[in-house]
Amino acid sequence: MSARGWTSVLAGVAGRFERTEQRLVAVTAVLAAALVLLGFLGQSAVRDREALLDDAVHRGNTLTGAALDVYRALADADATSLNAVVVEPHRVSAERKRFREDLFDAADALRVAASLTPAGPSADRVRDLADRLPEYSRLVESGWRHSAVSQPVGTSYLAQASHLVRGDLLRLAGELHREQAAALTEAQSAAGRPPWEVFAVGAATLVLFVLAQRYLARRTRRRFNRGLVLSTALVLASLVTVGISVTVAAGHAGASVREFDTVVAPLAKARNLAREADGDEVRILVFPKVGDVASLRDGLAALDEQVSAAGSGGGDRQRIDRAATALLSWRAAVRPLIEPGGAPLTYQQMSGLVIGTDQAAHAQQFDEVLTDAITWHSTHAATSTATARGALTNIDAVFVVCATLALLSLGWGLWPRIREYY
């Protein structure tokens, strides 16, 4: 349309509102529409954030924890399945019982994950893990049965089982945990983002109210219209309430995200690496390969890095120190194995380092203190998420009430002025 055409349209529209009462009706309609739009956007923005935090509280935290439990249980099962063929005869039953408990724990965690995971790649990984657990269990049980009668094929079965869990199951469990942790972080971050569309419409509405007040003051020679003033105050109050609530929620959600990312994540990785290192030690005895000792040494060094990262990330100092002390004791116990300084160790000497009572206590103690730290920080982070959700409770209703009252106040303020001209 040409410039002349737009001018004609605008002139026609202006011609329809030549009289003051017509202009006041138009002003009322525009302001009412702005209030309705603002109320709808404000309610939607708050409810969207409530839904994200509800999902994080009731599903995301549980699902992320279940994914982590799957990895830990499988890594522990790998180490325990090998322990059962090298420990003293009186300890075999306990190791086998622990292995089966690990598989039960993994299956339970997978059932939880399956009930909470929506359709998609994560659901596919949960099904793959659940489908492969029986195969893994069968390989280990066969390895034990043949090893008990000194048949070499037993070691082959156990090697296949260890390859399956390390090559496939732990990879799938790790991907599942990373996906769910990322989804939880994204949900909490999104919940803390300011509702800029609400603030933009709110600011425009306030400007419209100010312009309407100035126009009415010129036309009626009244400095203030009480209805417009009250409506303006209600709009401003609703925006301030939402702004403060979302800011508080963002603070708590951000604290939860930081704790998960900078403390729980490295501690969880350390615990998983520890179970793998425990398995590496026994693999050196059962079916040693070139590079196993170096892999164990690197794994223990990586543990120290992860524990230090958790401390730098703001982890509880007492719990981090306990983990560091337990790791130091573990590394000291196996130093002759990973840093040989003299004659090569005999099988009996290596066996004493790997499965001896002192070594087993150190590895188990490290796992226990890490589990305690992960549980404490996960609970603390989940509490922050719940607090963020609480900051938004009933804010959507407050916003709608303010918008409704502003709409009523608008009619109370302008209707008498309109009626004066009829």
Image (spheres, rainbow, N blue to C red):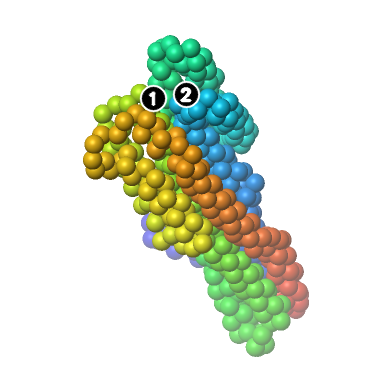
Describe the element under mark 1 as helix, strand or loop: helix
Tag shown at residue 145? none
Q: Nearer the viewer, residue 400 or 340?
A: 340
Quarter residue 102 falls in: top right
Residue occupied by mark 2:
85
The x and y percentages for residue 104 are 61, 29
In the image, residue 93 above or below residue 241: above
Residue kind at label 1, given as amino acid type: Val
Whether residue 162 sits left or right of residue 18 in the image: it is left
The x and y percentages for residue 159 are 40, 21
Identity of the residue drawn at 24% across and 43% down: 341
Disc count in the image? 2
Distance (Cα) linking label 2 and label 1? 8 Å
Residue occupied by mark 1:
286
Circle 1 residues within 10 Å: few <14, some 14–19, many ≥20? some
In the image, residue 302 above or below residue 191: above
Kindly tell me whether residue 60 is visible in this rendering: no
Q: Nearer the viewer, residue 129 or 187?
A: 129
Q: Which of 304 and 384 is in front in this view?
A: 304
Whether residues under marks 2 and 1 lie with C-beta atoms below 8 angstroms apart, the answer is yes
Quarter residue 300 falls in: top left
Describe the element under mark 2 as helix, strand or loop: loop
Q: Which of 84 and 27 is in front in this view?
A: 84
Whether residue 363 sits left or right of residue 18 in the image: it is left
The x and y percentages for residue 321 are 46, 59
Circle 2 residues within 10 Å: few <14, some 14–19, many ≥20? many
Identity of the residue drawn at 56% across and 43% down: 65
Quarter residue 206 falls in: bottom right
Residue lying farthest to the left in this orientation: 342
The x and y percentages for residue 14 are 55, 67
